Image (cartoon, coloured by chain):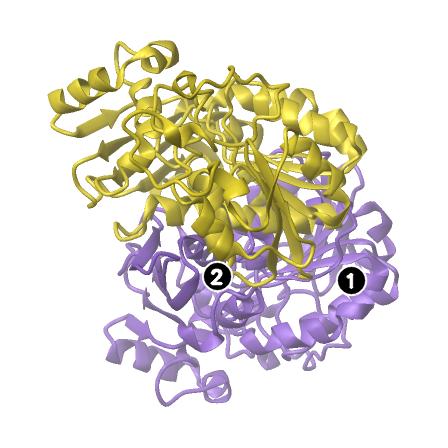
Chain colours: A yellow, B purple
Amino acid sequence: MDDIRFAVLGTGGIGRRTLEVSQHKDGLTAVAACDRNGVAVDHDGLDVDELLDATEGNIASGPQGGPGQSSGDEPRDSGPDEASGSTPATPTDDYASDGGAAAVEGGGVKQHGDQSGIVASEQGEPTETPIDDIIAESDAVDAVLLALPNLEHDFIPRVAERFAEADYEGVMIDVLKRSRVIGMLDDREGLLRESGITFVCGAGATPGFLTGAAALAAQSFVEVEAVEIWWGVGLKSGYEDNRGTVREDIAHLDGYDIETAREMSEDEIEALIDEHDGVLEFHDMEHADDVLLERAGICDAEDVHVGGVLDVRSDEKPTTTTVSVTGTTFDGETGTNTFELDDATSMEANVNGPALGYLKAGVRNNRAGHYGVFGPADLMPGF
Amino acid sequence: MDDIRFAVLGTGGIGRRTLEVSQHKDGLTAVAACDRNGVAVDHDGLDVDELLDATEGNIASGPQGGPGQSSGDEPRDSGPDEASGSTPATPTDDYASDGGAAAVEGGGVKQHGDQSGIVASEQGEPTETPIDDIIAESDAVDAVLLALPNLEHDFIPRVAERFAEADYEGVMIDVLKRSRVIGMLDDREGLLRESGITFVCGAGATPGFLTGAAALAAQSFVEVEAVEIWWGVGLKSGYEDNRGTVREDIAHLDGYDIETAREMSEDEIEALIDEHDGVLEFHDMEHADDVLLERAGICDAEDVHVGGVLDVRSDEKPTTTTVSVTGTTFDGETGTNTFELDDATSMEANVNGPALGYLKAGVRNNRAGHYGVFGPADLMPGF
């Protein structure tokens, strides 16, 4: 495949690690990145090491309204941080990252330059319109990875809309999790097609890697009865960097929802974690794996169950990440195929590798003129 | 996806089961099938049940020169059967199936009509040019599944060539196994592209299903060190139908090769099987998984190892079919991801489901104008 020039919107955890992992991959050149306050563009390829160095600590931790994050692998980009005095972001704001959020109380994370984030990089330029700045360069971009906080459920869909309205022709890819967002993208499919956009949604670990595994494991069967996605994340050393993520996960616990989790103080969260000895177990989470498998015709959304165990006091995974697909074969046998990730593979490896893998598949499709909205299962053998 | 009209070349084990499994799938209509002596075409869809009934017993068993078959899941179509008096087929012959081969000594399989095979079906017409007859209908065909005996290594590639020369625009898909065939298809890629053919090669179980699983399991890693594909097949009740397959497998045992296996008498094979108490174990088989993973950039062909255990005296799998992919993550950890098929899933389910799954993916690509030669791993997230 010819070289792929890509841009990253957002330089929180996902954005930065995408840049990092891309350096290990053939045929990927990062040409643009932006966060809340800055943009860096180099058509010959950014100096990723310098950029990563300068943006180290771009991690949010305060009470935030981030995306529906569960396996600890979405941008820990946070919502607007009242403590840092910024105004609440809305989808029409050009809020492209968590840059700035690291100043949150209790963060204790590294900061560079007068301002944090991309503007601390030699390659960065300050801007008040980072997304527009990237759109302005998008003729020279084959793929855009959205590592943005999906503050409102329609934030990512609305960003896609803006690219479409600017006649961007290329791939957009996100690692969103919430089931309800997929329909909002589907609603915009006509607009995306018209522009020439191949939008790959839900392409992180789960949904993403594990959705694809489920779609593949289903191939033995003519009828799929159940898909169980069960993840384990050990987050001791990554805990500080992933407080926003943990907060999101709490929203999935019994008695909590997005709103209550968002409003909890840090102390309340710590108390809750203490109560559970650092180990939180989740069942029936709202992960888009369900609608993504249903829209690919593999099974009903209600037959998909996502859960897992998060241990914030150990780096060992508390349980092995496993996808189990139970179905019936054409010759009438019932069985369960399984896909297991080695406990040594980190959450980050399992988000960012697949995200770039799906990005490449997206580019393959886009270059062939295949536009619209694709879930991970749509980029697999058909069912 | 709009309805897919497909044709099957060959009505041996793979061809017949493809027709059978397709009836459990949405959006697939079988419109044509052929074997050595006959062709059946119905643009509104064949009566698959009637065709299957009429062609029951279309299985070869005698000493044959079939394709590089190892996991017992390729067309057990055989070469020309001297015992039945036919002349040796060559790639330029219109030999499209194993019809007729069932008359082989010791077969004891069901026969219908004056002639065996498709002509025994109410829908069948006798022909001396079955492949040309299908080509003549190919404007109304979206995909052609080649369940042909790859008598010579270049037989399948040359059939593809004939479709290309007739300006067929659509998908062709095979379940071939031998590594060396892939290069022969690649040599014809220009011709296939020009015609508008999307050729999906090696799309059965292994290569195919398990190649795809390896490509997906690799997504955690930035460097893949080893891919181990290990299959188990229990073939007691299917033994009579799969003698040709067993013969092919024997070619992979120490001290044997394709030629020696082809020349063995039935008695010699039985003696060898007795010697092994019915259980044959294979290592380092020539399966195209290796070149298919290498051409997708996932690892070196030499790092891929395929082996397995065949038990012809039990229907239980003697070992669990497993794909293990060992690699290093971007953050420096080494691990092994695994994909396991339930022992209850038959070889047939694991060949024919994926073959139709890859066929659908091929049609998706073909309709988008994406032509050329694709392995299973090329229809997965990129690496």
User: Which residue is pictured at 79% across the width and 64% down the height?
Assistant: B192
Residue type at numbered disc 1? Pro
Q: Quadrant of residue A165?
A: top right
**Closer-to-camera residue (A345/B315):** A345
Q: Quadrant of residue B297?
A: bottom right
Q: Is residue A68 above or below residue B161?
A: above
Percent position of residue A159, x then y: 64, 27
The answer to whether A87 appears left or right of A196 in the picture is: left
Q: Disc 1 marks which residue?
A: B130
Question: Which quarter of the image is occupied by the N terminus of chain A?
Answer: bottom right
Q: Disc 2 marks which residue?
A: A24
Q: Secondary structure at mark 2?
A: loop
The answer to whether A107 appears left or right of B78 in the picture is: left
- Mark 2, Cα crowd under 10 Å, few <14 / some 14-19 / many 20+, is some
Q: Is residue A92 above or below residue A335?
A: above
Q: Is residue A213 above or below residue A375?
A: below
Percent position of residue B202, x then y: 57, 63
**Closer-to-camera residue (B28/B370):** B370
